[in-house]
Structure formats: structure tokens, C-alpha cells
Amino acid sequence: MPDFKFWNERWLSNQIGFHMINPHSSLVEFIDLFSGHRKVFVPLCGKSPDLIFLRNHGLEVIGIEFSEIAIKDFIKENNLNMKKNENAEMNFYEGEGVKIFQGDIFKLSSKDLSGITCCYDRASMVAFNEEERIRYADLLINKAQDLKLILAPLFDYGDILDAGPPYSVTLQELNILYGKNFELLQLKTSDLSLKESKKSLGATYEREVTWKFTRKQTLALRIFKRLFSNIN
Ligand SMILES: C[S@@+](CC[C@H](N)C(=O)[O-])C[C@H]1O[C@@H](n2cnc3c(N)ncnc32)[C@H](O)[C@@H]1O
């Protein structure tokens, strides 16, 4: 069960140190990866400026956020005209090229995620504990069936800890959770100064790694493509 009480309190007391004023540097640097895509998924979107950045690059943005405070702030701070839709399964706000579901990401259906071909994850996977990261991988792999590409700046401070958020996500874990379905590529690594809190738990390094995950083609698709290229 996600810790909604924790996140609710963070938003209520405005303890949102994770929130950035400007779009994330890795999103700005690697935005071209999304060219040719139409619908981008932004899980656990908060009120991130990344949403507007993606929208301004021509993408239809589909976010999900549990906190209604975050969604309302996002709309107000960006002066957007987004309407609330009361929906039996999950309410959502929509307008100006952005749709934000309000609720638990694990309640999204395959239908909600259909047509989404790319995903931008900033502070989403690292916000989940170990058990939630397994469920999240299942959602991206199996529920988001059209998903081909994920761009994700993640934190890595070793696998000795399960202290967070933000949680550490290592190459080994990514291989276990995603390796069968996605090719994993490290686009960029930045060393961060090791915080005392992490050091005292045994961490010896802290870095931000920006990942690109590309969905592996199934055998059936590979055969189809080969046949098709022979016809032409
Ligand atoms: C670390 S913040 C990141 C927000 C945003 N991605 C950013 O970069 O500013 C994680 C966000 O996820 C939301 N959240 C946590 N668990 C969730 C869940 N199970 N479903 C939907 N939202 C969730 C929290 O309310 C919080 O706003």
C-alpha cells in the first residue's frame, strides 16, 4: 500500500524539496529522444515544470499524481485552463495538451495507458520502496503495452540500503526488473556529494544516472519486419 499519508503531509506542509523550478537538465539535454512520439507518460508528476516543457515540445502529456494540492497548484501556477472530470474509475484534469489523473498510479488500467509510447520518469521510481518498484515495473512493462521508450534520471547509492525516498536504484535491480523487456543504456552519470545521512547507513557514493530504456522487439515483430522489408 503506497504511503499516501506521507505524501499528503508533504504537500500540506509545503515540504516539497523535490520540486524544481526549471525543467530537469537531463530532460532538456535528451528531449530529442522523444521526437516522433505523440503521447508521453509522466508518472508521479507533482507540479513539475517538466510537464510544460514536454507539452511545449509538441507532446500530449499524460500525468498521474495522488495529491490534488499538487495538481491544483500546477494549474494555478501555470495559469492553465484545465477542467476536472469526475470519473467512476479515476478523476482527471484535462486541458491545454495536458491530462493529469488524480489518484494511485497502481489503479491505472491498460485503457488509461493505451497509445502512450514514451515515458519520462523523474523522481518517480526513486519515490517507490522496493516492493512498489516491482509493481511499477509490472505496470510499465505489461499495462502500458504501447510503451517503447523510457527516459529516467535515477539515484544510485548502492544496494546496501533501502532508505528513502529518494531510494537508490542500481543497475543490478534494473536488470532484474526490466532487462528481459527493455534494453538499458546509461546516457549520463553525475557524481553527487555523499550526504551524511546516506554515509551513516553505509553508502560510499551517491550519483544520478540518466537511463534510456528501449523496449526489446518481440520475435513475432522481428519476423514481421523482416517479411515486410523483403516485400518492399
Ligand atoms: C518525489 S515526488 C516527484 C514529483 C515530480 N515528479 C517532480 O519531479 O517534482 C513524488 C510524487 O508522487 C506522488 N505519489 C506518491 N505515490 C503515488 C502513487 N502511488 N500514485 C500517484 N502519485 C503518487 C506524491 O504525491 C509526490 O507528489
Image (tube, rainbow, N blue to C red):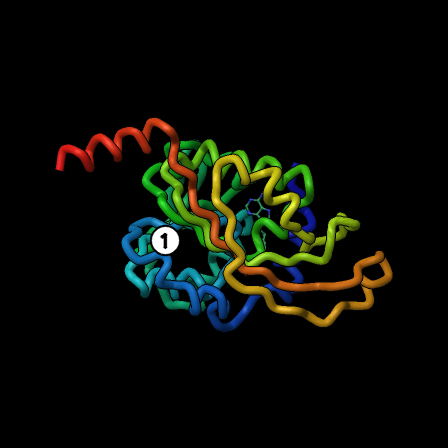
The picture quadrant where one finds residue 58 is bottom left
Q: Amino acid at mark 1?
A: Val
Residue at position x 78%, y 50% from top? 161
Residue furthest right as drawn = 200
Left or right, 38 with reference to 191: left
Q: Could you say whether the residue bearing mark 1 is in a helix, strand or loop?
A: strand
Lateral position of residue 127 relative to residue 24, left or right: right
Locate residue 61, reporting x and y percent.
36, 53
Q: How many marks?
A: 1
Q: Is residue 207 above or below residue 36?
A: below
Q: Position of residue 149 (x, y in %)?
A: 41, 48
| Crowding at mark 1 (Cα within 10 Å: few <14, some 14-19, many 20+) | many
Q: Is mark 1 within 8 Å of ligand 1?
A: no
As drawn, which residue projects farthest toward the top? 220
> Residue 93, can we see it?
no
- Which residue is at the far left? 232
- Please tell me which residue is depicted at 34% across the width and 60% down the height of the picture: 55
User: What residue is shown at x 45% (from left), y 33% (from top)?
Assistant: 143
Q: Nearer the viewer, residue 88 or 185?
A: 185
Side of 156 where 107 appears, left or right: left
Q: Quadrant of the N terminus?
A: top right
Residue 152 in percent (x, y) is at 51, 55
Image coords of residue 179 (percent x, y): 54, 40
Q: At 27% across and 54% down in the image, what residue appears?
A: 36
Question: To which residue does mark 1 refer?
Answer: 61
- Which quadrant of the rendered structure holds the C terminus? top left
140 or 220, which is in the foreground? Answer: 220
Is residue 77 visible in the rendered structure shown here? Answer: yes
